[in-house]
Amino acid sequence: MTDDLKQQFERLVADPPPPSAVPSESVFARVRTARRRRTAGALTLAAAAVVAVAVAAGNLTDINSSPPVTNTPSAPVTIVTGPPTSSTSTTPPTSTGATSTTTGTTTGTTTTGGTKTTPPPVRPIAVDVVLKPTVTGRTVSVKVTLSGTVIVPTVDGRNLPADTSFLNLSGGTNYYWGDGAQGGSDGGSPGCGGTTRKTGRETYSIETHTYAQPGTYALRYEVRYCNAKNSAFTITKTAKVTVR
């Protein structure tokens, strides 16, 4: 080793220049500078200098300060590794939703305890009349049965009492015996502007009638009730009466 190279080596180890990059890059730069100063006859000294620089750099604590890999056959093989890679796996939190139970109400159908209860259908406005005549000689008596659903009539804007009989809910009756005679009952002057429905049934007897001559006669019976159209409708029923 020449004195000039020896002095350069001592200055390099004793007073290294401040690093201008990460330690490993700084050491690599200094080695490259030393290589440019080599002569053809100083290969052995250069190899020794590289080993000494690697030993001096081994005292650095930074993980990035490891010396570079050299291609010198006699130099120790050093593998430079980067900082450990931290792989973070983030699993999104599992969202647990609350179960919402909604109980609905269906118009016209009531659900109670899983059982559907359907209200009875609205009865139509209609009246049925049954005539049952009884003949004794030439005299006849008749039983009339009225049944159905009607609108309760009003008097002075108010409904008739709830206990009003089904016959008295009518607007009156007429009956024709078939021989020119007739009779009936006056229902007064009820109004048909109400909306209350009532279903009922009633049987009653009309007055008797005596025919002057034997024969077969057509008895016609009429009764009037209020309907949902704010008006009265008439129900007519006929029956045959035979006298001897």
Image (cartoon, rainbow, N blue to C red):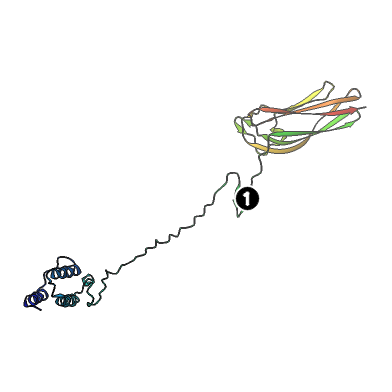
Q: Is residue 81 left or right of residue 10?
A: right
Q: Where is residue 57 in the image (x, y as percent from the top left)?
A: 18, 75
Q: Is residue 28 above or below residue 107?
A: below
Q: In this view, does 216 lie above or below 98?
A: above
**Which residue is most to the top?**
180
- The residue pinned by badge 1 equals 116
**Residue at left offset 77%, top offset 33%:** 129
Q: In this view, does 25 lie to the left or right of 171?
A: left
Q: Is residue 125 above or below residue 211?
A: below
Q: Which of 81 and 219 is in front in this view?
A: 81
Q: Quadrant of residue 62?
A: bottom left
**Which residue is most to the front?**
40
Query: What is the secondary structure assignment of the residue under circle 1?
Result: strand
Q: Can residue 34 be seen in this view?
A: yes
Q: Which of 237 and 63 is in front in this view?
A: 63
Q: Where is residue 141 in the image (x, y as percent from the top left)?
A: 84, 31
> Mark 1 is on which residue type?
Lys
Q: Quadrant of the C terminus?
A: top right
